Image (tube, helix red, strand yellow):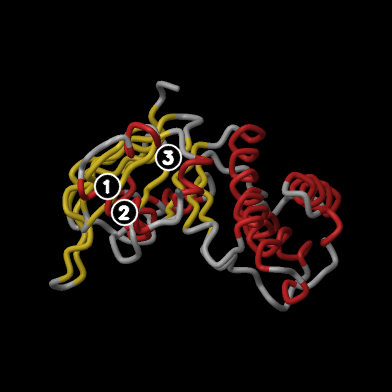
Amino acid sequence: MNEKVIDIHDLYKSFGSNHVLRGIDITVHKGENVVVLGRSGTGKSVLIKIIAGLLKPDAGFVNVLGKEVDKLGTQDLRELRLKVGFCFQNGALYDSMTVGENLAFPLKRNTPKITNEQVRKMVNVTLEAVGLAKTIDQMPSELSGGQRKRIGIARTLILRPDIMLYDEPTAGLDPITCTEINNLINEVQRRFHTSSIIITHDLTCAKDVGDKIVVMKEGKFVKQGTFDEVFSTKDELINEFYDYNFIQ
């Protein structure tokens, strides 16, 4: 786990007078799940949007899979994004398409020479991987919130990215479904050898999926390590966050 797939130093991002990221340093190694933990509005989602090239940093070094993201041209950025899967908080499914069509869309769009048979096989394999093979002909409106999250993950996985970026994967879900999503994130890591950043304010998610936990407060990282290392502390900033959550 020595190879760095994400390497960020001294990252700053502001929106007008709102200083969202204030000197962020983070490294993700190959095969590692890194959880960025913090309350809403601390800049967590801005961080992964910069990693995916959806936002430009004001200052700092952002290297993803050996490329300095903010220096890439349009074509090179497009190619990099194919290797970086972004799982949006709401699943971001197309409501007018079936589950199968939702998964097929990015394949057909990004690999124009792929055959219909290859598409069908990839869709079936990926749906099976997230435990929802039987939903292939269903519409998103027929799915539960947890199923929509799973299909969102499947659609991201269909292109076999090297990196997965999860934005609040358990938000709005009941505790049992949260556990299922956490298990799926770990299964994706194991089965597809992905490296991941998981953005969350859910301590259970952090504990279940994080090889490394990074705690963010007011645009800065205040502590990082394993879950036990981070929360075995008398630091008021950390304990305040622990008390804010629901783990006993």
Specify the amino acid type for callout 2: Phe
**In front of the other: 18 or 84:** 18
**Residue found 60% across the figure and 39% down from its top:** 186
- Indicate the position of residue 169 as horizontal and vertical percent values: 53, 57
Q: CA distance from mark 2 to mark 1?
A: 5 Å
Specify the amino acid type for callout 1: Ile
- The image shows residue 207, relative to residue 148, as above or below, that is above
**Residue found 45% across the figure and 48% down from its top:** 248
**Mark carried by residue 34:** 3
Specify the amino acid type for callout 3: Val
Q: Secondary structure at mark 1?
A: helix
- The image shows residue 12, relative to residue 2, as above or below, that is below
Q: Which residue is mark 1?
A: 238
The mark nearer the N terminus, 3 or 2, is 3
Q: Nearer the viewer, mark 3 or mark 1?
A: 1
Is label 2 in contact with label 1 (beta carbons under 8 Å)? yes
Left-right relation of 72 to 108: left
Image quarter where the N terminus lies is top left
The mark nearer the N terminus, 3 or 1, is 3
Q: CA distance from mark 3 to mark 2?
A: 18 Å
**In front of the other: 82 or 5:** 5
Q: Which residue is mark 2?
A: 241
